[in-house]
Image (spheres, rainbow, N blue to C red):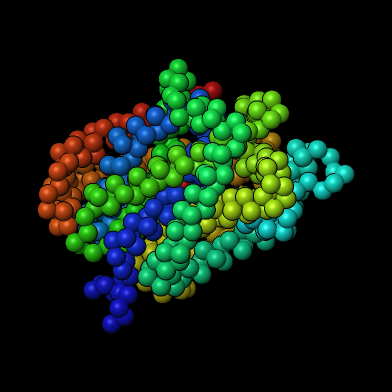
Amino acid sequence: MDANLNKNGRGSWNSRLAFVLAAAGSAVGLGNIWGFPTVTAQHGGGGFVLLYLACILLVALPVMLAEMVIGRAGEKNPVGALKHLKPGTPWYLVGALGVITGLIILSFYTVIAGWTVYYFIQAMGGALTVPPGAEDSAAYFAGMFRDMIANPGYEILFVAVFMIATTAIVAVGIQKGIERSIKIMMPLLFLLLAFLIFRSVTLEGAGAGIRFYLIPDLTAITPGVIVLALGQAFFSLSLGMGVMITYGSYLSKDECLPSSAGYVVATDSLIAICAGLIVFPVIFFMISAHGADLNDLVATGAGLVFVIFPQILTELPGGTAATLVFGSAFFLLLAIAALTSAISILEVVTAHLVDDWKIPRKRAAWGAGTVIFILAIPSALSHGAVGWLSEGGWFGISFFDLLYILTFRFFLPIGALGLALFVGWVWGLEKASEEIRTGTPAFRLERLWHLMIRYIAPVAITIILIAQIVDVFGG
Ligand code: PFF
């Protein structure tokens, strides 16, 4: 038998470290390095950080453990695992929603990931400096971004490059593909992060940025911000669509699930916080150098990373060389973070095809990768390249935003709610605890976890969902 396969003929992780790194790699993505600093800046700084951490501890961590337990007990992808644990019931539909959510999320995630690849290449080629005689740097970089998103050829080319990389890794399998690539990419990601933080916090004006970021201003916390914080927590931790079920299904029975979940959550939160330590000093450097306004700088998410950031790069002490090194490192960091997340999403879809449809892995991965690439085309073209897909076109908002809102605000919370209810009320806490205890003889927080997964998480998620519905359809 192939050493990479377990007794069921499925892949398996080589070690607990491999699992934790892969799960953390899924969690750490554009949502941390770009999303978290942007929403934090838009919603009052330190107060939002505090709220986010509360959501993580009270709701996201218990759901993460629930997903891992389902995966290891069900030994399959989300659809197969739920079918296995509760045969003959419709609960597998929660898993099916996860697979569909995965297809949709990856179809727009890969567009942004494609932009990061494009900017990394630009940075390496020295193109992130304003040529002499050009307009001012703000106009120059806004133009560069506009040219990229209005050009169908570029958009589709870079989506293709990114999807080929993602699919090639998933097609090879758990140990030889995902594990091997993660073991190179995650340490590289930590290294790039450390380098970028060091550069940022030593900038002029950094202190003001760090204060804004880390000193909580509780007056900025409103019900709307709480909703956002929980949505951000789910997205950032890859929860609600079965990534942790799928990754958990490749775990051996003697691994300690609560501490694995704890490590993944801690890594993800730490990296989100660290990303803020890169972005905020840089923003406040801009404010102190030009008297720019914080709200203008962070008004659009895309603007912050692809327009403002390159602009600031050109002003760093150290001239062109500093711009080249800092710029390349930053966009490489984003691209790697996106790749380790994209792999996990494609793995959910691939595992479903392999487990439940008996399609060989290579064919399943390349088939799913191709479908996602095709689905990504309308999102790629919805930033101005094709009018009816863009803002103000047929859908009122851009096609990209439509998919983003649908999944981020609805499908992920619905999926997380379904999984919490499944473990808390349907499959049963006793069975879940039994599964946890096979690798964790002393599961000390068992009662607390039961309380959270049975009551606190479902109630919190339901409130959030109602608030979202009122927000989207009410006004
Ligand atoms: N957690 C990833 C991020 O923060 O960018 C995004 C993501 C990956 C969301 C996987 C959902 C998912 F299933």
Q: Observer-nearest residue: 1 or 352? A: 1
Q: Position of residue 131 (x, y in %)?
A: 82, 48
The extreme right residue here reads 133
- Res 218 visible: yes
Q: Position of residue 363 (x, y in %)?
A: 47, 73
- When the figure is inspected, residue 416 is found, relative to residue 48, above or below; the finding is below
Q: Residue at x 37, y 34 (%)?
A: 53
Q: Residue at x 56, y 62 (%)?
A: 163
- The quarter of the picture where residue 290 lies is top right
Q: Position of residue 144 (x, y in %)?
A: 75, 47
Q: Residue at x 40, y 33 (%)?
A: 52
- Number of marks: 0
Name the side, left or right, on which 84 lies relative to 265. left
Q: Observer-nearest residue: 165 or 196? A: 196
Q: Observer-nearest residue: 338 or 66? A: 338
The extreme top residue here reads 219
Q: Position of residue 407 (x, y in %)?
A: 48, 43
Name the side, left or right, on which 462 lies relative to 468. left
Name the side, left or right, on which 408 lies relative to 15. right
Image quadrant holding the C terminus, namely top right
Q: Residue at x 46, y 64 (%)?
A: 184
Image quadrant holding the N terminus, namely bottom left
- Res 93 visible: no
- The quarter of the picture where residue 215 lies is top left
